[in-house]
Image (tube, helix red, strand yellow):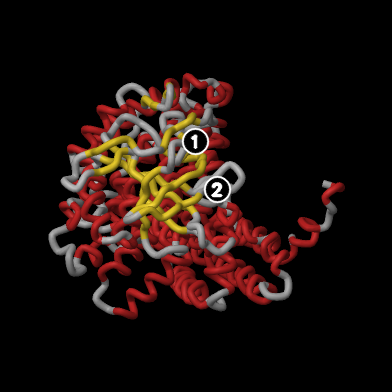
């Protein structure tokens, strides 16, 4: 089995050329975060990911988390890994220094988070949910809640969860039945929650659950949901732990993948009601929870990047050592010399690098929102983050399904055998398009809140940028760049056509727009990913002209971008046609004809 190696050269290149690392480091508050420091951080994270987390990935998959009598024991080695993970300060990298975090730029923490997700996706979920809970409490919690809960969570002594889903209410949060009854300075929570990632474990001394529930006077629907903080163990005034709260893990799910991450069913209030504390204002719980959900959506998109990178590395290592048949390519003695295997490897590589570029570009915009000195620049960046969040989540995870499948295909029959490890990445990736909002939910958010509601203003502004860059590439004297620019120009016209159709029909034919929502999301991701891939090819060309010391890597960036343009960007016109013409056949059959 291959060992994960963080693609540091590609990460740093993408951070600089797409994420805007140098400009972000120059923003107020980040002056001490130099590019040299960033490189050192990434190198240390790469060592930890390869030496600790990747070695536990197989253990977590085979052994999994184990439930017994309400208690959950993680796979062997996970508890020790969590302890060292926190002791080394990895958990608090993006968190505010006010609560003991390192306050590093989102772009930097995003690159490090990718390593955790590549090396051990199941393990990384515990940090992701904890930091999401930290964000929600920091933005919406009272000062008392912040003082009592944030520092131990940022340190990793306590972890956090998100409790939304109930047996009768999946994505339809309006159907939630959990109740919260006021009692003095707190509330008594009762109800059942399912699909709670890392909802129970023994890696830390406490678990902080954020729970959606209804107050007695709550209006119906999503406008009647409030958010509550329910710790596993109550916390005394001096910060020490008190008695066990009235909540329990009744079981954990038997899942297709991410076996090392326990997915818990939770009950609250079997013995009088779990004590909980209101976070934010009454009946505003969904808005508060969206702080955590948007954090999670971007990080789940990054999971698509991470697991795709790992599947690519695994397939590449196998292809370079597996001898079978007579290779057609000169210089190759393994199956990597078979053109179809090479096609799949190039497709995996090109898609993954474009996905990484999109995630890092969005992370860089988040840093601009947080610290750019110009208010207009901050506003524009915020609009871009809003537009790109469903694309990062939806397109990156959707793409990961095909990438991990190709990784298995490259292994041939051996890929279907669990011992080779290829199947785990395929299985682990499958959940990423489902949780934190399915691809369909992300797509409806994109065409509704992010496109129609503002008349396409932000997307059209982005298309103008892409159009300008495409024209510049087309005018380049370099034939390879010019060809990439031509493909990008045709793709941007397809995205523009799809957006115009969506905007023209959003009021009169919303069902037709919804039928084409996922194809439109794929279209947006394909084109924006192609734009960023083209930008990297242009940057690589400029660096080659100035210094050829890293010529192998830089030429590979150009070739990879060319492959994306000729094999993937061409999908844009077909996706445009589906958006514009596909609704009629999608919606034509009656229920009994399906």
Residue 305, relative to residue 271: is it above or below?
below
Q: Which mark is residue 398?
A: 2
CA distance separating discs 2 and 1: 27 Å
Q: Quadrant of residue 46?
A: top left
Residue contact between numbered discs 2 and 1, judged by CB atoms under 8 Å: no
What residue is disc 1 on? 265
- The image shows residue 484 at horizontal and vertical percentages of 49, 61
Q: Is residue 281 visible?
A: yes
Q: Between residues 514 and 500, which one lies in front from this camera angle?
A: 514
Residue 160 lies, in percent from the top left, at 34, 44
How crowded is the residue under tag 2: few (<14 C-alpha within 10 Å), some, or many (20+)? Answer: many
Given this view, does label 2 or label 1 mark the residue nearer the observer? 1
Tag 1 or tag 2, which sits nearer the N-term? 1
Q: Residue furthest left?
A: 32
Foreground: 59 or 325?
59
Q: Label 2's element?
A: helix
């Amino acid at each position: 089995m291959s060992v994960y190696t963080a693609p540091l050269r590609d990460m740093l290149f993408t951070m600089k050329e797409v994420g805007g690392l140098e400009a972000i480091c120059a923003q107020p508050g980040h002056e001490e975060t130099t590019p040299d420091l960033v490189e050192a951080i990434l190198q240390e994270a790469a060592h930890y990911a390869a030496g600790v987390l990747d070695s536990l990935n197989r253990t977590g998959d085979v052994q999994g988390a184990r439930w017994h009598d309400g208690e959950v024991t993680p796979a062997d080695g996970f508890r020790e890994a969590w302890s060292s993970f926190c002791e080394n300060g990895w958990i608090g990298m993006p968190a505010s220094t006010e609560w003991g975090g390192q306050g590093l730029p989102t772009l930097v923490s995003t690159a490090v988070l990718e390593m955790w997700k590549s090396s051990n996706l199941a393990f990384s979920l515990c940090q992701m949910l904890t930091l999401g809970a930290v964000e929600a409490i920091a933005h919406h919690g009272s000062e008392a809640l912040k003082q009592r809960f944030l520092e131990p969570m940022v340190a990793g002594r306590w972890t956090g969860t998100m409790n939304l889903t109930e047996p009768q209410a999946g994505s339809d949060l309006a159907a939630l039945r959990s109740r919260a009854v006021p009692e003095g300075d707190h509330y008594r929570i009762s109800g059942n929650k399912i699909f709670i990632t890392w909802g129970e474990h023994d890696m830390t001394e406490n678990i902080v659950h954020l729970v959606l529930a209804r107050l007695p006077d709550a209006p119906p629907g999503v406008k009647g949901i409030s958010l509550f903080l329910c710790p596993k163990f109550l916390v005394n005034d001096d910060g020490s732990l008190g008695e066990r709260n009235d909540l329990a893990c009744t079981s954990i799910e038997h899942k297709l993948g991410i076996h090392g991450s326990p997915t818990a069913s939770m009950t609250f209030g079997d013995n009088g009601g779990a004590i909980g504390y209101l976070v934010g204002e009454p009946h505003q719980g969904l808005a508060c929870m969206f702080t955590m959900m948007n954090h999670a959506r971007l990080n789940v998109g990054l999971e698509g990047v991470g697991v795709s990178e790992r599947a690519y590395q695994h397939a590449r290592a196998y292809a370079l050592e597996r001898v079978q048949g007579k290779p057609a390519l000169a210089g190759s003695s393994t199956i990597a010399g078979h053109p179809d295997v090479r096609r799949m490897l190039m497709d995996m590589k090109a898609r993954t690098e474009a996905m990484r570029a999109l995630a890092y570009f969005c992370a860089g915009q988040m840093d601009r929102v947080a610290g750019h000195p110009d208010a207009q620049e901050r506003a524009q960046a915020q609009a871009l983050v809003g537009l790109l969040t469903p694309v990062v989540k939806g397109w990156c995870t959707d793409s990961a399904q095909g990438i991990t499948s190709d990784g298995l295909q490259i292994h041939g029959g051996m890929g279907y055998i669990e011992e080779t490890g290829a199947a785990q990445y395929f299985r682990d990736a499958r959940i990423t398009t489902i949780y934190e909002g399915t691809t369909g939910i992300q797509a409806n958010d994109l065409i509704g809140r992010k496109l129609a509601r503002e008349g396409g203003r932000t997307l059209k502004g982005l298309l103008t940028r892409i159009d300008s860059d495409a024209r510049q590439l087309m005018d380049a004297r370099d034939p390879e760049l010019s060809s990439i620019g031509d493909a990008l120009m045709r793709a941007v016209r397809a995205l523009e056509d799809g957006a115009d159709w969506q905007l023209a029909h959003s009021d009169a034919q919303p069902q037709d727009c919804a039928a084409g929502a996922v194809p439109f999301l794929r279209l947006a991701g394909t084109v924006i990913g192609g734009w960023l891939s083209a930008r990297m090819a242009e940057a690589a060309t400029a660096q080659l002209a100035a210094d050829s010391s890293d010529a192998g890597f830089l030429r590979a960036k150009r070739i990879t971008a060319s492959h994306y343009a000729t094999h993937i960007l061409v999908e844009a016109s077909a996706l445009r046609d589906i958006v514009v013409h596909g609704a009629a056949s999608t919606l034509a059959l009656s229920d009994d004809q399906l």
